Image: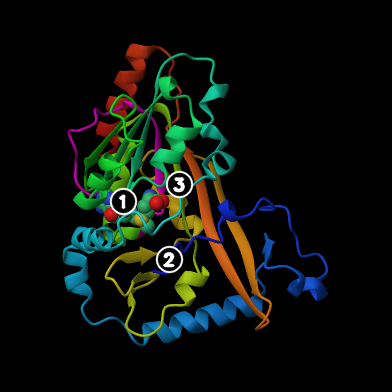
Amino acid sequence: MGKNEDAASPDDTAAFGTRYLVDKSKVYDFNAWDNVEWSDEHIETAMAKVEEQRRHPVCNAEDLLKSPADQWDKFYNKNERKFFMDRHWLLKEFPELDFSKYADDKRIRVLEVGCGVGNTTFPLLDCCNKEKTFVLSCDYSPTAVRLVRENDLYNEDHCHAFVWDITKPTNEIPDNSLDFVLCIYVLSAVEPQKQKTAVENIVRLLKPGGTLLFKDYGRYDLTQLRFKKDRYIKENFYCRGDGTLVYFYSQDELHELFTSSGLEKRENTQDRRMIVNRAKKVEMYRMWLKCNFSIVNSIFIPQLTVYWSHSYRVIHK
Ligand SMILES: C[S@@+](CC[C@H](N)C(=O)[O-])C[C@H]1O[C@@H](n2cnc3c(N)ncnc32)[C@H](O)[C@@H]1O
């Protein structure tokens, strides 16, 4: 994993989302362009690279899948807080998190899953009204959770960090109790076979009307295409040099993953960026996916809502 590998994400430039490549002869005038359509040629090249990766799979995949939390724990022991950038783009990308817009005075309960050392948790606490918000933050790396708790900005009046592997059930949070769940570059770290269980485990914590916000890697993102030999585990799933795992999604897969867990689509969009190495005249394509999926709040009588969501889960299991 390269340091701050989502560094070309919307957080790094004020011009994000507004620079379009209309005249192709000007491609080397800037370092980055937004929303660039992928040509057939680019997609064919990407498919050829993946085919090459398939021919050279990693040999110790089974070992890596046995203890992914240990790999992340080692990662945080080594890198501590020095690796990921704070996600200061949160409100820009997820205006739903601007709680000042909500008239209701009830405290909004947000869970961040796979919080790492708090690069999303602390910017979120910083940009929202702390009296109106309570942020629960979990990660399955005990070292990451310790680093969140030791941060000077950590305050149990507004935040609670705890160890939880989202592929397993938890008693830490009651069912139907959360307004938002944030999944920022975390589901991609979960083995594909366990992702459905992980999503079901977090969806059951959402209130009716509650929302899951997601941002992660899209299929054929530069990060995927850069993997060389001995990194491929299975389709679109790889290990990095430090043993951490990463999956690259299509929009259709995410739609199926979230809707089959009882959520309804509000947004499922591609965030495409072309990065240009002007000196070497090389064009590189980034692709992130951004989603907002919610539990439909179709029944408004509180007692019935509880009944509805409970029976919904029973039927759905
Ligand atoms: C790429 S990091 C992202 C960290 C943070 N969300 C951010 O944006 O800075 C992925 C995080 O997910 C955590 N993670 C991966 N699988 C997990 C699981 N099954 N349960 C809880 N945390 C998990 C890892 O420990 C790691 O901290």
The magenta region covers 167-188
Nearer to the camera, 68 or 266: 68
| Residue depicted at x 26% and y 50% | 144
Q: CA distance from mark 1 to mark 2?
A: 29 Å
Q: Amino acid at mark 2?
A: Lys
Q: Position of residue 140 (x, y in %)?
A: 23, 50
Q: Is residue 294 visible?
A: no
Nearer the viewer's eye, disc 2 or disc 3?
2
Nearer to the camera, 230 or 266: 230
Q: Position of residue 249 (x, y in %)?
A: 45, 61
Q: Quadrant of the C terminus?
A: top left
Q: Secondary structure at mark 3?
A: strand
Residue corresponding to mark 1: 196
N-term-proximal mark, 1 vs 2: 2
Q: Is residue 126 above or below residue 306?
A: below
| Residue depicted at x 31% and y 41% | 151
For the residues labelled 1 and 3, say whether their Cβ atoms are less than 8 Å apart.
Answer: no
Residue corresponding to mark 3: 214
Q: Is residue 10 above or below residue 130?
A: below
Nearer the viewer's eye, disc 1 or disc 3?
3
| Residue depicted at x 59% and y 70% | 285
Question: Mark number for residue 17?
Answer: none
104 left or right, relative to 274: left
N-term-proximal mark, 1 vs 3: 1
Q: Amino acid at mark 1?
A: Lys
- Could you say which quadrant of the image residue 163 lies in? top left
Nearer the viewer's eye, disc 1 or disc 2?
2
| Residue depicted at x 54% and y 23% | 100
Label 1 beta carbon within 8 A of ligand 1: no
Residue corresponding to mark 2: 3
Q: Position of residue 69 (x, y in %)?
A: 21, 58
